[in-house]
Image: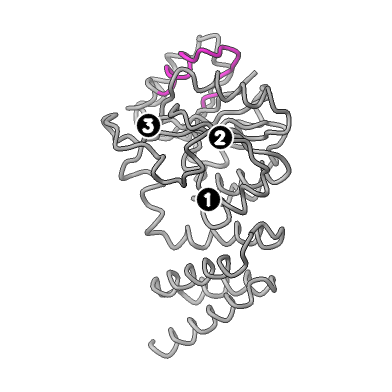
Amino acid sequence: MVSVIIPNYNHAHYLKQRIDSVLNQTYKNFEIIILDDCSTDNSKEIIEQYRNNPKVSNITFNDTNSGSTFKQWNKGIALSKGKYVWIAESDDYADSKFLELTVQQLNDNNDVNLCFTQSYRIDKNNVIIDNCLHWYGSEFQNAFLADGKNFIKKSLWAQNQIYNASAVLFRKSAYPYPAKQIEKLKFVGDWYIYIMLIENGKIAYLPNILNYFRQHQTSVTSKLDNSTTHLFESYLILKHIASNRLYINYEKYNIRLNYLAGLLLTRKMSNRDFLRLSAFAIKFDYLLPFRLAVVKSKLLLSKNG
C-alpha cells in the first residue's frame, strides 16, 4: 500500500485539484493522510468534504502553525501504514498513472528506495510554463536505475536536482525516521532526506511527465535564490556529503563551497551568522580551503565596517 501524505498550508484554491488527482489514480491501493498546518483560508472547509471518503485514513488540523513543512512530513510518516510514501504537496497535482508507474519500479526492484519522474512546471492558473527536462543533462532523457551513492556524487552533491517532492515515491523502510534534524530546516529538508534515502540503496528515474509542479511567487522554491537562511542550511547537506565522501571531484566540491562563501559575503553576514558558520566549518578538515575563505571574508567585512 502507498501512504499519500498531503501537507497543506493556505492552498485552498488548489486543494480539490490536488486531492482529486490522487483519488483518480489508476493504482488504487493507497491511503490519504491530510495534514493542515493551521491554514487561515478556507482549507478546512474543503478538506472536510473528503472526511468520509474511504481512501482518507486521517485528517489532522494543527491548532498552531508548526513553522516547518518537514515537521509535517515526519508527522505523516508516523501516521502512515503503507509500504511506500508519496508526499503530494497541496498546490501540485498528478497524472493518473503516477502511482501505477512509480510503484512498479519499487515493486520490481527491492533495492530501489526512491523513484522520481519528470514534471511540468505550471503557474497559479494551471498554465504550463515548461517541462523540467531542460534542467537536466542528456542522461535524463531515458529511464534508468542507479546506485544511490553514485547518483549523489553526480547529481545531488552541489544542489537538489530532484526539484519537486510531489514527483517522488519512496520506500518507507528507508526513511530515516524520526529525522528530527530536518525539522529545523525551512528550505533543504527534502534534499537532505533524498540523500539519506538513497545513500544505502538505489534510485529509479522515469522521464514520463507525471507531475504538475506549481511555481508561484509565494512558493518556497521561488524564494531560494534570495535567502541567506537557505545558504546556511545548505551547510548541513555539505557536512553530510563531506563526512561520507559523497563527491567525485574534491576541487569542484571546494569551488561550490567557496561560491557559497562569496554569496554569504555579499549578504554582509552579521557577527552571529559568522560565528555559526565558523563553528560549523572548523569541525571538518575537508573544508579547510573554505574556512580560510570565510576568515578572509570576515576580515574584509571588519575593514570596511
- Viewer-proximal residue, 302 or 110? 110
State the SS at label 1: loop
**Residue 303 coordinates in the image, percent (x, y):** 42, 90
- Position of the N terminus by quadrant: top right
Nearer the camera: disc 3 or disc 1: 1
Q: Give yes or no for residue 24 being in the magenta stretch.
A: yes
Q: Tell me the magenta residue range.
A: 18-34
Residue name at image x 61 percent, y 44 percent: 193
Is 267 in front, or is 36?
267
User: Which quadrant would residue 133 be assigned to in this image?
Assistant: top left
Q: Position of residue 52 (x, y in %)?
A: 50, 9
Q: Are marks 3 and 1 in contact (CB under 8 Å)?
A: no
> Residue flagged by tag 1: what amino acid is it?
Val
Q: As displayed, is residue 258 above or below residue 171? A: below
Label 1, residues with CA under 10 Å away: few <14, some 14-19, many ≥20:
many
Crowd around label 3: few <14 · some 14–19 · many ≥20 (10 Å): many
- Going 44% across and 73% down the picture, which residue do you hit? 262
Q: Residues within 10 Å of mark 2 (few under 14, many from 20)?
A: many
Question: What secondary structure is marked by label 2?
Answer: strand
- Dot 1 or dot 2: first in sequence order is 1
Which residue corresponds to mark 3?
11
Which residue carries the number 1 mark? 188
Q: On the rendered structure, is 44 left or right of 73?
A: left
Closer to the eye: label 1 or 2: 2
Decide if residue 78 is on the left or right side of residue 19: right
Q: Earlier in the sequence, mark 3 or mark 2?
A: 3
Q: Amino acid at mark 3?
A: His
Q: In which quadrant is the C terminus drawn?
A: bottom left
- Looking at the image, which is closer to me, 107 or 30? 107
Q: Which mark is residue 205?
A: 2
What amino acid type should be assigned to the residue bearing mark 2?
Tyr
Please state which of the two labelled residues, at mark 3 or mark 2, is closer to the viewer: 2
